[in-house]
Amino acid sequence: MNAEVRVPTDTLRSKQPRFQGMTAGHRACLGCGEALAARLVTEAAGPDVMVANATGCLEIFTTPWPESAWRVPWMHSLFENTGAIAAGMEAALKAQKKSTKVLAFGGDGGTFDIGFQALSGMLERGHNVLYVCFDNEAYMNTGIQRSSSTPHAAMTTTSPPGKERMGKRHLKKDMVSIVAAHHIPYAATSSVAYPSDIRQKIRRAMAVDGPTFLQIHSPCPLGWGHDGAESIDIARLAVKTGLFPIIELERGGLTGVMPIREPVPVTDYLKRQNRFRHLFSDDLRAEQELEHIQAIADHNIEIYDLTGHGESVYDADGMSIVRRGGMRRA
Ligand SMILES: Cc1ncc(C[n+]2csc(CCOP(=O)(O)OP(=O)(O)O)c2C)c(N)n1
Ligand code: SF4
Ligand SMILES: [Mg+2]
């Protein structure tokens, strides 16, 4: 490199994030949305945290014995008790008069299904815990089984398309609404396609003294069937179709949405993923399913008024480079 254009190391260092709670040494697949999301979350949360982490890909790929990618106190919990473990950690810290924030991490399987009871109890009792769900829409760590977060018609090893059905028969569970129905101070969705939105929401949740929840849409190249280099594009399309609305709820009421300037057809999102390839076959049921999925996206656009702020620069097209955080309603 020409010495005249060399950037001093100190300048480079000053531009690096100050703290990374999850760093090198993990073994996630290339393009893993969950790995990137977890890095962003821990970066925004800062060093004064303790983590309870349900079993799943995140736990497995960050702790291949004897290595660990964690730079914060971190505890592996079972699938079913992450909420209870996090609540216990918070109670212990409170008894010691420490202000360290407890974070709880789980996949969609660990959150929507198996750990749901402990999560509900933790929310209802008002523990000061930020629960983050890394939503990759199936049980990926054990080989892509459907969860209650898997979208309708997606192919997994336990929802194969065939004579009986076109992939998963049921709808994706509306988890953020269920969580918000616990009247907690703050619940929101975000996507790994919008890092500044994740950071802003984590900082917001960290400042709340009480239970908070963030569900982050995190593509899994292995389970969704796309190239790892396309993860961010695909995550952005989920938002821009209306299939994954980015919203904020406070005490159960909707307070913010990320608007979509020009919604794109759901086929633009679906056709990029192998898990939906049967919907682009000659099967007569395929067209019906595509119409059904478009209707789901249209419904989201309507109920959250996602196109209502189409003139704003703070939307699904522009906000990642323009501003942090979702648009707030008056
Ligand atoms: C009670 C229980 N059931 C099943 C398993 C096996 N298991 C370990 S990880 C995993 C999948 C996790 O799925 P998810 O929570 O969505 O996380 P992901 O791996 O997709 O990130 C399963 C089924 C287990 N460890 N405990
Ligand atoms: S299987 Fe999916 S979630 Fe698991 S490490 Fe690979 S890309 Fe990430
Ligand atoms: Mg999962």
Image (spheres, rainbow, N blue to C red):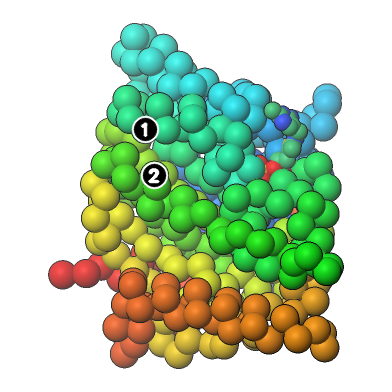
Pinpoint residue 255: horizontal percent, then vertical percent: 25, 61
Tag 1 and tag 2, C-beta contact below 8 Å? yes
Which of the two residues, 192 or 142, is positioned nearer the viewer here? Answer: 142
Residue 4 visible to the viewer = no
Q: Is residue 165 left or right of residue 136?
A: right
The kind of residue on which mark 2 rests is Val
Q: Is residue 240 above or below residue 34?
A: below
Decide: few, some or many residues near mark 1? Use Cα within 10 Å; few <14, some 14-19, many ≥20. many
Q: Is mark 1 within 8 Å of ligand 1?
A: no
The numbered disc on residue 173 is none
Quarter that holds the N terminus? bottom right
User: Mark 2 — residue?
Assistant: 179
The kind of residue on which mark 1 rests is Leu
Decide: few, some or many residues near mark 2? Use Cα within 10 Å; few <14, some 14-19, many ≥20. many
Pinpoint residue 85: horizontal percent, then vertical percent: 52, 21
The residue depicted at 76 percent of the width and 57 percent of the height is: 159
The residue depicted at 72 percent of the width and 46 percent of the height is: 139
User: Mark 1 — residue?
Assistant: 123
CA distance for labels 1 and 2:
8 Å
The residue depicted at 80 percent of the width and 72 percent of the height is: 274
Q: Is residue 87 left or right of residue 29?
A: left
Mark 2 falls on what kind of element? helix
The residue depicted at 71 percent of the width and 38 percent of the height is: 56
Pinpoint residue 280: horizontal percent, then vertical percent: 77, 84
Which of the two residues, 154 or 85, is positioned nearer the viewer here? Answer: 154
Mark 1 falls on what kind of element? helix
Q: Residue lying at the far left in this picture: please name it.
A: 330
- Sequence-first disc among 1 and 2: 1
Residue 134 visible to the viewer = yes
Pinpoint residue 149: horizontal percent, then vertical percent: 59, 53
